[in-house]
Image (cartoon, rainbow, N blue to C red):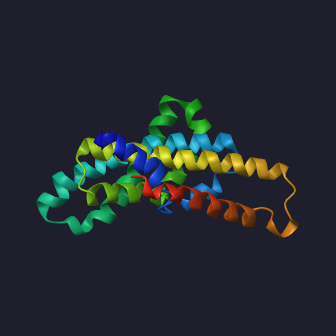
Amino acid sequence: MEYIIIIISAIFVNNIVLAQFLGICPFLGVSKKLETAVGMGAAVVFVMALATLVTWLVQFYILNPLGIGYLQTISFILIIAALVQMVEIILKKVSPSLYQALGIFLPLITTNCAVLGVAILTIQKDYSLLQGVVFAIANALGFTFALVIFSGIREHLDLMEVPKGMRGVPIALVTAGILALAFMGFAGLV
């Protein structure tokens, strides 16, 4: 039951993008087409789960025992950047077709503050390793969920007649705000 609460809370109640406002740059930048939103979401799920696993291990087996917990943020940034580079190199060698399909998504994940935010939140919430990985996957799924919904809305808006001054970024920001308000309505559930 505890894991179900973590999953529901991360996806709907405390959605990393729509309630905590982390990962807004890729949310707005990659959400123009549904295909790119799904590709970015899949890459974020993989990297966020792996990054949380590694950062949790580093925090509890290296930083805390050595009394250098104050290096958490810089350590986590370096770990996430290294993991993204490692994943990119491995995919390029092992599966060139998947590497081509993900394209720019992998380097974009390095600058996605949602990945760092989830890694730090996992430590702050004092989750066990399994709880932390479930939390990370659920947050990544919440990111993907928000990205897919928003990209569908943006594709639909391209077919609509929007006033000239509201086309492009302005209508995207208004839509993102309304979508965030809708998700904040879930805050009383968990």
Of residues 63 and 49, the one nearer the viewer is 49
> Where residue 162 sits in the image (x, y, percent)?
84, 60
The N terminus lies in quadrant:
top left
Q: Determine if residue 48 is in view.
A: no
Say whether residue 107 is left or right of residue 128.
right
- Vertical side of 3 occupied by 189: above or below: below
Outermost residue to the front: 188
Of residues 170 and 60, the one nearer the viewer is 170
Of residues 141 and 178, the one nearer the viewer is 178
Say whether residue 33 is left or right of residue 119.
right
- The residue sitting at 77% across, 48% down in the picture is 156
Q: Determine if residue 131 is in view.
A: yes
- The residue sitting at 52% across, 58% down in the picture is 185
Of residues 118 and 73, the one nearer the viewer is 118
> Where residue 20 sits in the image (x, y, percent)?
47, 62
- The residue sitting at 67% across, 42% down in the picture is 34
- Vertical side of 13 occupied by 40: above or below: above
Q: Quadrant of residue 5?
A: top left
